[in-house]
Amino acid sequence: MMPAVGNALKIDIRIDSDLWTETKKVKAAVRRAITQAAAALSTTGAELAIVLTDDSAIRLLNRQWRGIDAATNVLSFPTKGAGGEPPLIGDIVLAYETIAREARAERKPFAHHIAHLAVHGFLHLMGYDHERDEDAKAMEAAERIILRRLAIPEPYRRPAKTLNKPAKRPRKRPQTSPEVGREFRFKI
């Protein structure tokens, strides 16, 4: 847990799965991302919890709270008007297997993807959403600004696919038909 200093954001990170093996690196990446997001939104004097879990646990939460029986990468649970000192703004839950699978599929460093999802979750806690197109654009713009400050590349740009075209077959030379005495080409 990070101690609260003055109006600093208090971030509690809890690991609920043995899949998170590089805990120091992950905690540092998540803490840095949340701290940058809080600074960008001028969020101070608050507390939040980050839970690093696995697909089975997040699937249960997703089914219970959203009615979706599937694992997901991140869930956010904002607290409305919770008291306390500092005030609790909510919880962010991150699932290892889904995040690792997405990072591999998108050819992104794991640390970049986890930072992006931590920022995404934090923005949800602060009231951002992506249900409507204009809301999604605003949320993505905020994510881009924060991630740029973290030196993380544009998260929504897909890497250019390498076109692995098959090698061209050598062209067959025209053959002369002995019967008609004229040329014809074989179709390749």
Image: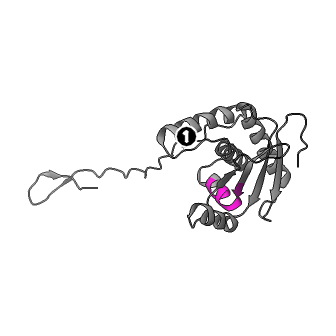
Quarter assignment of residue 95 = bottom right
Q: Give the magenta-colored segment's residue range.
A: 93-102
Predominant SS along the magenta part: helix
In the picture shown, does residue 74 fall above or below 123? below
How was this image coloured? one colour
Which of 26/165 is in front? Answer: 26
- In x, y percent, where is residue 173? 27, 50
In the picture shown, does residue 56 fall above or below 94? below
Quarter assignment of residue 73 = bottom right
In the picture shown, does residue 35 fall above or below 96? above
Which of 108/169 is in front? Answer: 108
Residue depicted at 52% across the width and 37% down the height = 137
Crowding at mark 1 (Cα within 10 Å: few <14, some 14-19, many 20+):
few
- In x, y percent, where is residue 54? 71, 64
Q: Which residue is mark 1?
A: 157
Which of 152/10 is in front? Answer: 10
Q: Is residue 71 visible?
A: no
- In x, y percent, where is residue 1? 88, 49
Q: Quadrant of the C terminus?
A: bottom left
* 125 left or right of 1 in image: left
Q: Is residue 31 visible?
A: yes
* 71 left or right of 12 in image: left
Residue 71 is covered by the magenta coloring: no
Amino acid tagged 1: Arg
Which of 35/84 is in front? Answer: 84
In the picture shown, does residue 168 fall above or below 98? above
Residue 95 is covered by the magenta coloring: yes
Residue depicted at 61% across the width and 59% down the height = 72
Quarter assignment of residue 152 = top right
- In x, y percent, where is residue 42? 74, 31
